[in-house]
Image: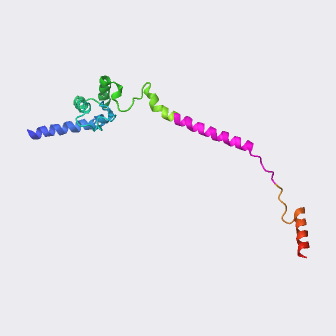
Amino acid sequence: MRLAVALLVVALGVAAFADGGPSFQELEESLTCQCGCGLTVHACNHLQCPSAIPLRQEIRQQMALGLTREQVLAHFEDKYGEKILSSPTTQGFNLTAWTMPFIILAAGGVLVVLTLLRWRRAGERQTPRAPVAAVPNPGEQSAHERTLERELERFDS
């Protein structure tokens, strides 16, 4: 008889795992503890927490009903409100919480590029360009070099 019960428990466990049912820890991490600690139900470290303990029992009850992860989370959201969820949903106004960091980062990048381009153009306008001196032919001497050569010859003599 004990063997039959053990096999039944193992079979139910394997069946629950095979159909992709949510794990207890996964559900605990998806819910925020309501005691004020700001942690998930799984991470709440208060001994005899007045919020985490009943929530864990309720999670077990929902799992016993064979509900999917989404159904369990929907149950808790209906009962406690959206604040129970550890991450915001991707619907409605919460979509802003997911997209705004990327939008702000992209806008900041564009602003930096435009500022650098403006600084570069302003620097080009303000910097006078030195005229390019004609490079003398290596075999020819300029008038200054000829004068210098004459003066050096006079000095040596």
Q: Is residue 37 left or right of residue 125?
A: left
Q: Residue at x 80, y 53 (%)?
A: 132
Q: Position of residue 135 (x, y in %)?
A: 82, 59
- In the picture, the quarter occupied by the C terminus is bottom right
Q: Is residue 156 left or right of residue 122?
A: right
Q: Which residues are magenta?
A: 104-132
Q: Residue at x 59, y 36 (%)?
A: 111
Q: For this rendering, which residue is in front, 59 or 83?
A: 83
Residue at the outermost front position: 155
Q: Is residue 109 visible?
A: yes
Q: Main secondary structure of the magenta part?
A: helix
Q: Which quadrant would residue 35 be assigned to in this image?
A: top left
Q: Residue 127: within the magenta?
A: yes
- In the picture, the quarter occupied by the N terminus is top left
Q: Position of residue 75 (x, y in %)?
A: 29, 25
Residue at the outermost top position: 78
Q: Is residue 77 left or right of residue 115?
A: left
Task: State the count of labels.
Answer: 0
Q: Residue at x 29, y 34 (%)?
A: 41
Q: Position of residue 140 (x, y in %)?
A: 87, 64
Q: Residue at x 12, y 37 (%)?
A: 5
Q: Is residue 51 left or right of residue 154?
A: left
